[in-house]
Image (cartoon, rainbow, N blue to C red):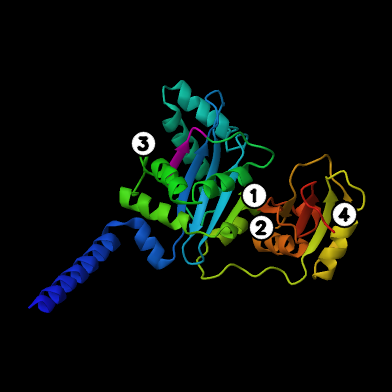
Amino acid sequence: MRQILIARAMALVLVAAILALAWIEKNSALSQALRSGRPCLVWLALRHEPSQKAPALFLGIYQPARRTLDIVFFPAGTRLPGGQTLESAYGAARKAGSDGDDAARRMAETAGEHLSNLVPAWPNWSGLPLWVDDSPPFQDEPPLEARNWILRRTAGPRQCSELLRAVWRRHGAAGSWTRLDRFLLSSELHRLPSDNLRPAWLPPEAQAAQVLGRCLLPGPAAAPPAPHPTVEVLNASGRVGIASRAKNILRLNGADVMSVGNAGGPLNRTLVYDRTGGFENAAAVRRMLGCAQAQALTQVDLKRLVDVTVVLAEDCPLQ
């Protein structure tokens, strides 16, 4: 008799689990996107002090099929049609009586309207709003700061709870994002490998459709890196000969080093820039370099005529 009761209880639990999954599939826009492989969008506004004229705005593009999160930074001075900037859109909303959250939402909506013009194949850029007032001060690369902010809040259960609180906070209109979607998204970000967070600057208008299109296209795997990426190496460490050592290491690992020189000024961290919109090339060159401290990001600049720029800082002790 006891075994029969246990079997019935287990069957009831199984049925309840199936019904719960069916309910989630029906009521969660994110769950449907995860199942179909469609990208999910998140607007992240980071502000480290109330006196900032406007928060730093980022668009997160999460691809469930390949489990990557592209983090695209929108400079406050980004020019929009009609001569307006994102900073002025935020300021106009504040002057009209909006609080910081509503003004940030208007800033994100304006950025989305701009993207609709740049990428006609993707007209809807609405996403989960995530506004944060206590981010640390930015250094030289805002996309990396946003990436590190997310990493710090997915490093463990306590840190993830901070992300959950930020995601669950109400920020005005959130479209079709329910609290269930917010919880599922937090869980997804918590499980992302750090190498799958890909920071980027907003590409120039001429390349926006192509570069952002790569982020939006579904697919189970990211594009492979170029077999022999072209590279320029710049020395920002103040140490003599480090760029030449990096050149030799990269060439031994298959990169085509086109030039070696000095950077415009010193940096406190080694950076590897993707210059064509293929983050995989920068990630591959970072691995070739063998410098664990180096960080990769995308900043499209076709005038440099290379796939990747390596800027060496003092934190990269090449032997």
Q: Secondary structure at mark 1?
A: loop
CA gap, disc 4 and disc 2: 24 Å
Image x and y of residue 139, in percent = 67, 37
Residue 126 in view = no
**Start-end of magenta stretch:** 128-134
Q: Secondary structure at mark 3?
A: loop
Residue type at mark 3 is Gly
- Main secondary structure type of the part rendered in magenta: strand
Decide which of tag 1 and tag 4 comes sooner along the chain: 1
Q: Nearer the viewer, mark 4 or mark 2?
A: 4
Residue at 81% over, 53% down: 317
Q: Dot 1 corresponds to which residue?
A: 203
Which numbered tag is attached to residue 277? 2
Nearer-the-camera pick, 75 or 249: 249
Decide which of tag 1 and tag 3 comes sooner along the chain: 3
Q: Is residue 180 left or right of residue 229?
A: left
Residue type at mark 2 is Gly
Badge 3 crowding class, 10 Å Cα cut-off, few under 14, some 14 to 19, many 20 or more, is few
